[in-house]
Amino acid sequence: MAKSLWKQTKFYAGVTLGGLLIRSLFTLSRNKLINESNFTEPLESGRNVVLAIWHGQMLPIIYNLRNRGIYAMVGYHRDAEMIARVLNRLGFYLVRGSSRDRGKEAMSRSLEIMNRPGSVLGITCDGPIGPYREVKPGVGVIAHKTGSVVVPVAANSTRKKVIKSSWDSFYLPLPFGRNRVVFGEPIYPEDFSGTNPVKSMLEEIETRLNTLQTEEDRRFGAE
């Protein structure tokens, strides 16, 4: 009983500290959104948007898009549970599940949400465990079935600590740096046809997201 209580205490302390840490790191730095109209204009024209993100670059995007009523897809494993609680505190709604855990449930919920006007869903396209910077099918399936626009999003920072032991080269921005979040050109599902339009769209998402992130890595260094 005492051991279980200690685990719960550590978990909730981690959630609280995680939220405070994210706010502190970014409050003590300069944050800039680049080409945000690529994200906002499709919404203003009545289209829903799926934000395509690489797992390792999620923190600047989470902070700079907080409190906008965006949905985020998060799994059920232990680390994901903590991330989910932190996201909730930062004003995100949650879609629970991933490609490795309750994927059908997550897909069903995502389709329901993205059929509602004005919805935005953020997906780490190579999560939860990789392969590194390879897009998984979910983002393309959701876009095609709901007519949602996919907007690639990249990020980088001048000061950061890269967790080199992590599969995704996850990085933690450090205080007193400059953080950039860059929105790429929107990708429209109706532009893809043929025998396998989802596959063609996935290839385009991966290419554009990798190009966008590579440009940011060159700007500030990938380490």
Image: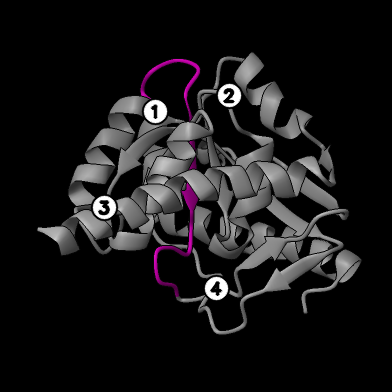
The kind of residue on which mark 3 rests is Gln
198 lies left or right of 164: left
* Crowding near the residue tagged with mark 2, few <14, some 14–19, many ≥20 C-alpha atoms within 10 Å: few
Q: Residue at x 50, y 57 (%)?
A: 202
Q: Tell me the SS state at disc 1.
A: helix
Q: Residue 205: x percent and y percent?
A: 58, 55
Task: Please tell me which residue lies in front, 190 or 38.
Answer: 38
Look at mark 3 in the image and give the residue it sits on: 8
The kind of residue on which mark 2 rests is Arg
Q: Earlier in the sequence, mark 4 or mark 2?
A: 2
Q: Residue at x 64, y 59 (%)?
A: 57
What's the CA distance linking mark 1 and mark 4?
Answer: 27 Å
Q: Residue at x 38, y 41 (%)?
A: 142
Magenta span: predominant SS is: loop
Look at mark 4 in the image and give the residue it sits on: 168
Using the image, tell me which numbered label, if any, was put on residue 114: 1
What's the CA distance linking mark 4 and mark 2?
Answer: 26 Å
